[in-house]
Each structure stands twice: as C-alpha cells, then as structure tokens.
Image (tube, helix red, strand yellow):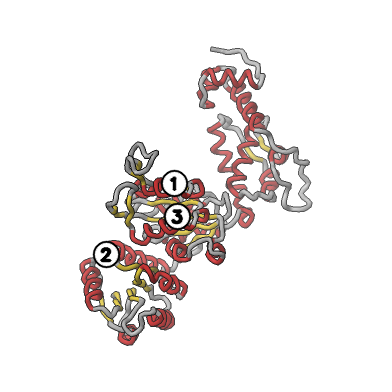
C-alpha cells in the first residue's frame, strides 16, 4: 500500500488514480498529522509526499514530516514532490533519507517509474542471501561478462549489481582510473530488463561545452552555421535502453544544468526543433573524481549529484584486491594467445608473485597493457618475472622482492617492430598472412619492413 500526502485534494486524487490503474493500493493524507496517524495504523510500502503544505510554504513543514517518518519507519522509501524552483528542498530531503524526488509538473510515466524503482530497491534491500557468497554462485545468478576476480569486496559489488540491475535506479560508479567502471556499467545493463535495447557510452570528458547540446540531444539541419545535416543525439540513440555517462565529473556547470533538466523531466529538445521529445532511459554515470568534494567546492551541482546518485558503487583499486592479480594476468594471457597466435604461452608462478607486489597506478588497465607489452617482446613461451620487469614502469611495491633491475619501457616503434618480427617468424615470411594477421595491407607491411630494416624473403 502506498501513502499519498498532499494538501491539494486534486493532486492526491490524480496520483491515487494513476497508482490504482497500475495495480497499487493507496491511502491519502491531507496534512502531516493525518499522515503520521495513518503510518501508525497501516503497513505502507512507500510514501509520496509534497514538500509544501498550505500552513508552511517554505518547505520546512515537509522536511520536518520526512524526518519524523524516517525516525518512525526508517526503512520506508519516500518520494518527494517539489517545484523546480525548490529543488534545494528536495536535495535536503535526500540528505535526510528520501529515496527520490520528482518536480512539478510531473510526468505520470516518470512518477510511476520512480515508484517502481523505489519499491524494487526496497525489496532488494530487505532480501537476505543464504550461504557463503562465491563467484560461482554469482555467475549462476547473473551475467557478469568479462569481470574477472573473486576478492570479497568485488563479490559484494557484483551481488549489488545483480540486485539493482532489474530496477531503473540511476547508478553512480566511482573508482580510480582503470578499475573497470565501464565493465560494471555494462553488467548493470546486461542484467536489466533493457538488455535487448541499446547501451550507449558517452565520454563526457571528450565533449566540449560548445558541442554538448548537439552531441547529447542532436540537431536539425541549419540549426547553426556548420549544421549541414540532421544529427541524432546520444540520448535518442539510447532511448529504451541505457546511457553510460563516463567522466561526469568533467562536465562544466552550464552543461550540468542542461543534463539535470533531461534527467529530471525525461524530455529533451533537438537543436533547431522546438518540439519536446520523451525519453525512456536508464542512466549510469562514472567518475574517478570525488563528486562530493566537487559539490563542496561549488564545481558540481548538488541537485545533479543526488539525481545520479540513487545507487553508488565504489570500486576498489587493484592494490586493494591483489589476490585477483594472478587471475587477471591469466585472463589477459589467454586472450593474447589467440591474438598473437602463441598457444603455448604461460606465466611462471614466480612472475605471478612478482606482479602481485607491483605498484600499478593505472590499475587493471595498466596491468593489461604491461602484460601485452611483455607478450609482444618475450622470446620464450614461459613468461618470467624479468620479462615483466623489463616492461614495468614502476618498481615492486613490496620491499625485499629481489627482482632484476628494471630497464624501462619500449617505444611504440620498438613494440611495432617486435610484433612484426614475431609475426614474420610465425608465418614464415608469408607477407599476405602477416599483413592479414596485423590488419595491414601488403603495401603498408612492406613500408614498415623497410622502415624497421627487417629482412625478409617473400614466400608468396
């Protein structure tokens, strides 16, 4: 049962009718006193409440009621309704524990979606899982794709992803560069009801403020000087599916306002077209910055922060899950066996132990690059610690680890030359096969052979 609290009878009736048509039972309260009385008599699953009552137009009355509700029924999800000009009240309400907020005039579709999301999240929170949490059990329940690892911290994150994915709650993924935020976003999408729909990735750090509207919302031909053809925006591409907004901490304040409008109303306008278009979309954001700190510094809007932050996922750095490093290395090597046609590649136990102690500021991404560089230049099929160390950018993190002195990294030209030499050897100087394996034309391969002074005797 859902409790609707508003001093406007028409508003209560409208929301109640919408919810009843969707299959929910409702009760109505016209003021805080009546709402608290009903809360003591009935078991409600959710409350929807206005922030302003006729007795107090400042919103303080609404905040006071919310605080009393959270004290009386701490697990009851509450959705707030407020005017656009009073979003600061909703932000304060989110601090007090509200589940979500909707601005007036609201879309019935969006409000109903918010209700379903809040109820689903509440149900997931109440669930208790029996038995020990294992990676095998999670893989049986969810589609976790290429996420590698079984560290307890990671397992808890994967469990959370599986639980929240069926909802439409916005998700904020925080973590250092290279910790796998995109893989987590993809897992949210794959385990959701939107998995058959588009998953659109947007790197906001690579979009300038002047191009933000055109990139995100699209434009009509002639909308501005260089608009020579219609352009479909990223939001339209992702409609019915999931949009992944990476590096959201890089967004300038003006663009943040535009993004908030879209996320709040689920409508947008294409540049050059005044017609508003509706959106049905799941939003997943990621950042390697501390958004809460940016809010304090005035560089990130607090209302946008709460809008994208219904669910937060904090990814641990690789140094916090070092036991997963051997699993990751083996995973990368198995993939590289196919890529570089070296089926006998192996990693020695000594090398795996050495890699566990390596400082990797770039986390999983840096580890992957290190493994690939090593595979490219290693002469033997058994990769040893000194093979990795020769390509490592950092010294071992653990004191006392007696590895060979690092000799620095190779240049791009050196890496390319090494890869060509290995391919030439593997394919016995067959130019056509080498070019095909490297994704080059025969002419491009010949130019590189001459550039790097690599001798060859064409077999074809």
Give the distance between the C-alpha atoms of the residues marked 3 and 2, in whole angstroms.
26 Å
Mark 1: give few (<14), some (14-19) or many (20+) Cα within 10 Å. few
Q: Is residue 359 above or below residue 123?
A: above
Q: What residue do we see at 30% from left, 86% from top?
A: 34
- In front of the other: 160 or 203: 203
* Residue at the spot of label 1: 211
Where in the figure is residue 320, as x and y percent of width and height? Answer: 62, 57
Q: What residue do we see at 41% from left, 46% from top?
A: 215
Give the distance between the C-alpha atoms of the residues marked 2 and 1, in whole angstroms.
32 Å
How many marks are shown on the rendered structure?
A: 3
Mark 3: give few (<14), some (14-19) or many (20+) Cα within 10 Å. some
* Residue at the spot of label 3: 255
Give the distance between the C-alpha atoms of the residues marked 1 and 3, in whole angstroms.
10 Å
- For the N terminus, which image quadrant? bottom left
The first of marks 1 and 3 along the sequence is 1
Where in the figure is residue 8, as x and y percent of width and height? Answer: 26, 78
- In front: mark 3 or mark 2? 3
- In front of the other: 255 or 203: 255
Where in the figure is residue 188, as x and y percent of width and height? Answer: 42, 54
Find numbered disc 1 in the image and state the secondary structure of the residue it sits on.
helix
Q: Are marks 3 and 2 in contact (CB under 8 Å)?
A: no
Q: Quadrant of residue 121?
A: bottom left
- In front: mark 2 or mark 1? 1
Residue 116 shown left or right of residue 142 in the figure? left
* Residue at the spot of label 2: 108
Q: What residue do we see at 67% from left, 37% from top?
A: 383
Find numbered disc 2 in the image and state the secondary structure of the residue it sits on.
helix
């Amino acid at each position: 049962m859902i409790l609707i609290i508003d001093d406007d009878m028409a508003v209560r009736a409208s929301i109640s009718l919408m919810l009843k048509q969707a299959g929910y039972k409702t009760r109505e309260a016209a003021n805080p006193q009546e709402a608290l009385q009903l809360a003591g008599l009935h078991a409600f699953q959710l409350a929807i409440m206005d922030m302003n009552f006729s007795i107090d137009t400042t919103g303080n009355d609404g905040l006071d009621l919310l605080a009393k509700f959270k004290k009386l029924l701490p697990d009851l999800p509450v959705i707030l309704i407020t005017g656009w000009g009073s979003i600061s009240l909703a932000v304060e309400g989110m601090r007090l524990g509200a589940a979500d907020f909707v601005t007036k005039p609201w879309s019935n579709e969006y409000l109903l979606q918010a209700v379903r999301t809040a109820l689903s999240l509440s149900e997931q929170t109440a669930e208790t899982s029996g038995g020990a949490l294992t990676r095998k059990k999670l893989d049986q329940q969810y589609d976790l794709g290429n996420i590698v690892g079984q560290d307890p911290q990671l397992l808890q994150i994967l469990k959370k992803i599986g639980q929240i994915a069926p909802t439409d709650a916005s998700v904020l993924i925080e973590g250092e560069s290279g910790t796998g935020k995109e893989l987590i976003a993809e897992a949210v999408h794959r385990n959701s009801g939107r998995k058959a729909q588009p998953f659109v990735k947007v790197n906001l750090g690579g979009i300038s403020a002047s191009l933000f509207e055109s990139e995100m919302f699209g434009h009509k031909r002639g909308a501005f000087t260089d608009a020579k053809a219609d352009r479909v925006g990223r939001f339209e591409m992702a409609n019915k599916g999931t949009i992944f907004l990476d590096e959201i901490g890089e967004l300038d304040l003006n663009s943040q306002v535009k993004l908030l409008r879209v996320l709040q109303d689920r409508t947008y306008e294409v540049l050059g077209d005044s017609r508003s278009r509706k959106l049905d979309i799941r939003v997943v954001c990621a950042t390697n910055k501390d958004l809460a700190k940016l809010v304090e510094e005035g560089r990130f809007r607090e209302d946008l922060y709460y809008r994208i932050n219904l669910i937060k996922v904090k990814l641990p750095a690789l140094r916090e899950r070092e036991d997963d490093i051997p699993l990751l290395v083996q995973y990368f090597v198995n993939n590289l066996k196919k890529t570089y046609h070296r089926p006998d590649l192996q990693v020695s136990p000594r090398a795996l132990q050495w890699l566990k102690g390596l400082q990797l500021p770039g986390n999983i991404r840096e580890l992957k690059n290190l493994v690939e560089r090593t595979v490219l230049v290693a002469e033997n099929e058994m990769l040893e610690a000194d093979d990795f160390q020769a390509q490592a950018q950092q010294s071992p993190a653990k004191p006392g680890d007696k590895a060979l002195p690092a000799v620095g990294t190779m240049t791009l030209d050196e890496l390319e030359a090494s890869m060509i030499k290995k391919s030439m050897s593997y394919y016995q100087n067959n130019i056509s096969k080498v070019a095909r394996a490297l994704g080059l034309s025969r002419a491009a391969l010949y130019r590189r052979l001459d550039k790097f002074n690599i001798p060859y005797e064409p077999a074809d």
